[in-house]
Amino acid sequence: MKRVVKSGLVLGAILGVIALLGLGSKAVSEINKGAATITIDVIKKTQAPVLFEHKKHQERAGDKCITCHHSEKEGEQPKACRECHNKEGAKVALKDAFHKSCKDCHKKENQAGKKAPEKCNECHKK
């Protein structure tokens, strides 16, 4: 009887470790996190490019890619924004997607007492 209980505890511990390690699904460390900084230049004809600090935003989001990459499921390799929003017939154009997502998040951050840029020239630096 003691042996069965011990075996069950060992099996439970092993399954717990497997669950914690995320085996069976991609762990965040396995996903290509992309460049530390990304130059966003989709409206370079009218505005200076944005030097997007991708790594800092990932850290602020707790490495939850889905915070910005809304169409991916947790654990999937995120696509670059332009892969969906730059296509013919996209529901939301790339520029509009950046502006809505970035501005909305920055407003929330500022309302929470954090500092995030909201003016054009704070992101589009010449």
Image (tube, rainbow, N blue to C red):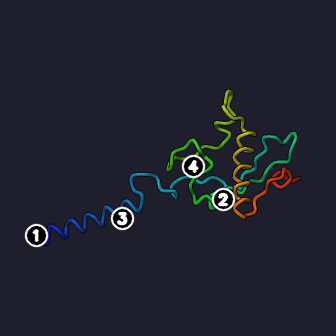
Q: Residue at x 72, y 64 (%)?
A: 113
Label 3 and label 1: CA atoms lie apart by 25 Å
* Residue at image point 86% right, 52% down: 121
Three-letter amino acid code at the position of disc 3: Val
Q: Position of residue 57 (x, y in %)?
A: 66, 57
- Per the model, the C-alpha gap separating discs 4 and 2 is 14 Å
> Which mark sits nearer the N-terminus, 3 or 1?
1
Dot 4 amino acid type: Ile
Residue type at numbered disc 1: Met
**Could you tell which of marks 2 and 1 lies nearer the N-terminus?**
1
Please rate how many residues cluster around mark 1, counting C-alpha atoms within 10 Å: few if below 14, some from 14 to 19, many from 20. few
Confirm or deny contact between disc 4 and disc 1 (CB under 8 A). no
Residue placed most toward the observer, 70 or 109: 109
| Residue 17: mark | 3
**Distance between the alpha carbons at the discs numbered 2 and 1:** 53 Å
Image quadrant containing the N terminus: bottom left
- First along the sequence among labels 4 and 1: 1
Q: Is residue 119 left or right of residue 10?
A: right
Q: Which residue is mark 2?
A: 55
Could you say which disc has been placed on residue 66 in the image? 4
In the rendered view, does 59 fall on the left or right side of 53? left
Please tell me which of labels 4 and 2 falls first in the chain: 2
* Mark positioned earlier in the residue sequence (2 or 3): 3
